């Protein structure tokens, strides 16, 4: 039997509304046998200006995405990365990321596993369930918060840690 593969993903966007805002960065991490085996990362040209508050949060500027591919050009690569052997897509606050992808016409037809929700179940009483706070509490490296690949890598490690907690009970 082939090992189960998961993909942890994260998006950076121009705002919070999947129907009005745009994706500016995608990061995805393939997890097999509790190890990261591949990564996918790209900036995306949103076809609009990036609000100053988003530039300050992410460090992604208009000039960074000016020559980046459009979302339409990137989505086939992302779909290929989330190959047929992937059993679930993992995200921290999955409704946000998958909502943006659904608005762009992407539905991976797989279960979504939300590390925010899993942490709430497996780690009751945490003062915060933000990705950054969970990483600090569990000694998980989060090098550059609010950059898609770094957040996806941290989400992948958080997912592996939470799975280990779940299966150690």
Image (cartoon, rainbow, N blue to C red):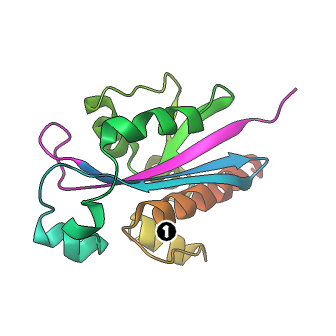
Task: Assess whether residue 16 is covered by the magenta stretch.
Answer: yes
* Residue for point 23% across, 69% down: 63
Pointer 1 local density, CA inside 10 Å: few below 14, some 14–19, many at least 20: many
Between 155 and 102, the one nearer to me in the picture: 102
Residue situated furthest top in the rendering = 109
Task: Report how many numbered discs are placed on residues in the image.
Answer: 1
**Residue 50 placed where, x, y %?**
15, 62
Tell whether 51 sits left or right of 81.
Answer: left
Per the rendered image, the range of residues in magenta is 1-22
Tell whether 80 sits left or right of 126.
Answer: right
* Residue underneath mark 1: 134
**Residue 77 placed where, x, y %?**
50, 38
* Residue for point 74% across, 35% down: 4
Task: Assess whether residue 99 is covered by the magenta stretch.
Answer: no
* Residue for point 38% across, 28% down: 106
**Residue 69 placed where, x, y %?**
34, 48
């Amino acid at each position: 039997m082939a090992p189960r593969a998961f993909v942890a993903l994260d998006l950076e966007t121009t705002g919070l509304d999947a129907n009005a805002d745009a994706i500016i960065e995608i990061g995805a991490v393939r997890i097999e046998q509790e190890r990261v085996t591949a990564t996918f990362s790209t900036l995306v040209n949103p076809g609009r200006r990036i609000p100053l508050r988003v530039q300050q949060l992410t460090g992604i500027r208009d000039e960074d995405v000016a020559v980046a591919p459009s979302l339409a050009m990137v989505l086939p690569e992302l779909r290929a990365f989330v190959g047929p052997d992937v059993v679930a897509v993992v995200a921290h606050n999955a409704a946000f990321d998958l909502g943006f992808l659904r608005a762009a016409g992407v539905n991976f037809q797989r279960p979504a596993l939300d590390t925010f929700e899993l942490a709430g179940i497996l780690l009751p009483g945490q003062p915060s369930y933000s990705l950054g706070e969970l990483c600090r509490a569990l000694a998980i490296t989060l090098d550059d918060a609010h950059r898609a690949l770094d957040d996806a890598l941290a989400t992948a490690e958080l997912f592996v840690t939470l799975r280990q907690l779940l299966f150690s009970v």
